[in-house]
Structure formats: C-alpha cells, structure tokens
C-alpha cells in the first residue's frame, strides 16, 4: 500500500509550499522507482525531477487546482 499525505504547516495559498509525502507499507526492502504526477484537467503529467517519496513545490494559482499522485513501480530482483 502507498499512503500519501499532504503536510500543512500553514494554510495553502499562493507562495506557500505544497508538501506531500508518500509512505510505502508492506514492501519490505524491495527496490522501487517513484514519480510524482499532476492532472490539471489535461491528463496526468510527470513532475520533472520529482522521483523521491517527498514532493515540495511552491503553490501557485495553477497547481493549487490540480490533482496530485505518486506512481510507484516495483523493480523485480534479478
């Protein structure tokens, strides 16, 4: 299971950071790749360079209206 939480220190408004953190539960020490994505109504788009379990972006009028997710792919052991 992947749990995503939005971490709020302040109210979300332009100029504040949008901070999201994903936690992987039940995967043990398995290797994985991660990619944060957003949907602004045009479909899901990768956030360039956002490949860790934490995402921090400055909030603006555009991205505050987006849906966000993280795509996690498990890497099979060789």
Image: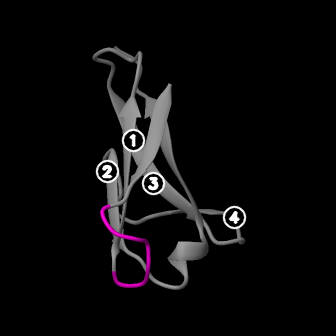
Count of numbered circles on the image: 4
Secondary structure predominantly adopted by residues drawn in magenta = loop
Q: Residue at x 39, y 41 (%)?
A: 22
Q: Earlier in the sequence, mark 1 or mark 3?
A: 1
Instruction: Report the span colored magenta.
Output: 9-15
Check if mark 4's residue and mark 2's residue have beta carbons within 8 Å. Answer: no
**Crowd around label 3: few <14 · some 14–19 · many ≥20 (10 Å):** many
The answer to which of marks 3 and 4 sits earlier in the sequence is 3
Contact flag, marks 1 and 3 (Cβ < 8 Å): no
Disc 1 residue crowd, few under 14, some 14–19, many 20+, Cα 10 Å:
some
Instruction: Place residue 50 in its image quadrant.
Output: bottom left
> For residue 11: magenta?
yes
Q: Residue at x 37, y 34 (%)?
A: 23
Note whether 37 is above or below 14 in the view shown: above
Q: Position of residue 75 (x, y in %)?
A: 40, 26
In this picture, is 11 found above or below 37? below
Element type at marker 2? Answer: strand
Image mark for residue 43: 4
What residue sits right under mark 3 in the picture?
36
- x and y percent of residue 19 in the render? 35, 60
Of callouts 2 and 1, which one flags the residue occurring earlier in the amino acid sequence? 1
Residue 71 position, x and y percent, is 51, 43
Classify the position of the C terminus by image quarter.
top left
For image coordinates 37% across by 31% down, the residue present is 32
Q: Residue at x 55, y 63 (%)?
A: 38
Q: Is residue 76 magenta?
A: no
CA distance for labels 4 and 1:
21 Å
Task: Kindly report which numbered mark, 1 or 3, lies closer to the viewer in this rendering.
Answer: 1
Determine whether the residue tagged by mark 3 lies in a helix, strand or loop.
strand
- What residue would you read off at disc 2? 54
Structural distance between the alpha carbons of marks 1 and 3: 10 Å
Badge 1 is on which residue?
Answer: 22
């Amino acid at each position: 299971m992947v749990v995503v939480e939005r971490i709020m220190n302040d109210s979300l408004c332009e100029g504040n950071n949008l901070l999201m953190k994903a936690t992987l539960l039940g995967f043990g020490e398995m290797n994985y790749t991660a990619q944060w994505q957003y949907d602004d109504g045009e479909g899901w788009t990768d956030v360039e360079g956002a490949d860790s379990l934490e995402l921090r972006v400055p909030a603006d009028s555009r991205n505050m209206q987006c849906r966000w997710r993280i795509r996690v792919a498990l890497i099979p052991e060789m």
